[in-house]
Amino acid sequence: MSATSARPRVGWRLPPKWVTISLFLLPALAVYLLFVLFPVIQAAHYSLYKWNGLQPLTDFIGLRNYVTALNSSTFITAVSNNLLVIVLSLALQIPFSLSLAVLLNRRFRGRSVFRLIFFLPYVLSEAVTGVVFSLLLQPGALVDSGLKGAGLGGLIQDWLGDPNFVMITMFIIVSWKYFGFHMILLLAGLQGIPAEIEEAALIDGAGRWQAFRYVSLPLLGPTLRVSVFLSMIGALQLFDMVWVMTAGGPLNASNTMAIAMFKAGFKNSQMGYGSALAVILFLFGLVVALAYQRFVLRRDVEGALTVFNG
């Protein structure tokens, strides 16, 4: 027998753990680098120039676009509007969604129909929602006629034309659009809590409110914190419905950071300045996300980590 034939054959072996992980990560990493990280770097580069988007990048002005943005009353109003939506969402939208989730978690006839009805607004696109409400809120249209018919004519406002009231109108519409999403999310969290835990609290003498406050609500904490996080990020990115309904008007009263960025870059052909606004919006969202994860979601994230043993 030859030495070659006597040599034992080496069987096929699985690749090392890091190779397997790399092969799974590479496609997602390539997409992330191409469509997320590269545009951010490119926008940061453009923001250092006075550029209309057509001519070569030759007029380098450094950080002047950022100084202009931070001293612009229009952009400050846009930031204030985003923060207003965040505050109102946390104070009104999330508690309302939680209340509905608690009610629809109870057993009663027709609850599936109510879940469907409350979730339906979320299915509509932002553009369709904006067009529909633009028609409903026109002077003398359905909303005004309904209020007059109900004897509430004194509540009629210039819903989309009053600079002092337009953002309240926008928040109501945004809440109508998205409360169903948060309701379903919180409802899923409630259904993940074993019913025996709350029943045990009731047997021990706790009232239904006490059982919810001291038993169900703490267990719902991780889901509630995720819902709050999504609400904050969504408020920072607010664009579609506001643009369709008011385009940031009247008198820039309903501007958001995304609308200010779009107007500067695509309406006024100030791509350098618009890129600076985009970078500021990105940094704003990044700081909020990192701070929220560091101080609020840290315990939830650490509890979800598992060790990969290969």
Image (cartoon, rainbow, N blue to C red):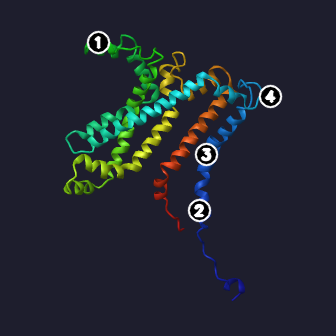
Displayed quadrant of residue 130: top left
Q: Residue at x 32, y 13 (%)?
A: 154
Query: Badge 1 local density, few (<14 within 10 Å), some, or many (20+)?
Result: some
Spot occupied by residue 297 in the image (x, y as percentages of width and height): 48, 50
The answer to whether residue 289 is left or right of residue 270 is left
Instruction: Give whichever of discs 4 and 2 has the lower sequence position.
Output: 2
- Give the distance between the C-alpha atoms of the residues marked 4 and 2, in whole angstroms: 46 Å
Mark 2 residue type: Thr
- In the image, residue 181 above or below residue 56: below
Please state which of residues 102 and 27 is positioned toward the viewer in this rendering.
Answer: 102
Q: CA distance from mark 2 to mark 1?
A: 67 Å
Where residue 171 appears, as percent x and y from the top left, is 43, 27
Residue occupied by mark 2: 20
Of the residues tagged 3 and 4, which is closer to the observer? 4
Q: Of label 3 and label 2, which has the lower sequence position?
A: 2
One can see residue 238 in this view:
no
- Mark nearest the camera among 2 and 1 is 1
| Neighbour tally class for label 4: few under 14, some 14-19, many 20 plus, Cα within 10 Å | few
Q: Residue flagged by tag 4: what amino acid is it?
A: Thr
* Label at residue 32: 3
Give the left or right position of residue 71, taking residue 191 as reference. right
Report the mark closest to the observer, 4 or 2: 4
Left or right of residue 224, residue 44 in this image? right
Q: Residue at x 48, y 48 (%)?
A: 296
N-terminal of the two: label 2 or label 1? 2
Quarter of the picture containing the C terminus is bottom right
Q: Which residue in the protein does label 4 denote?
A: 58
Instruction: Identify the residue under disc 1.
Output: 148
- Amino acid at dot 3: Tyr
Tell me whether circle 3 and circle 4 mark residues in contact (CB < 8 Å). no
**Callout 1 touching callout 4 (CB < 8 Å):** no
Which element type, helix, strand or loop, lies under badge 2?
A: helix
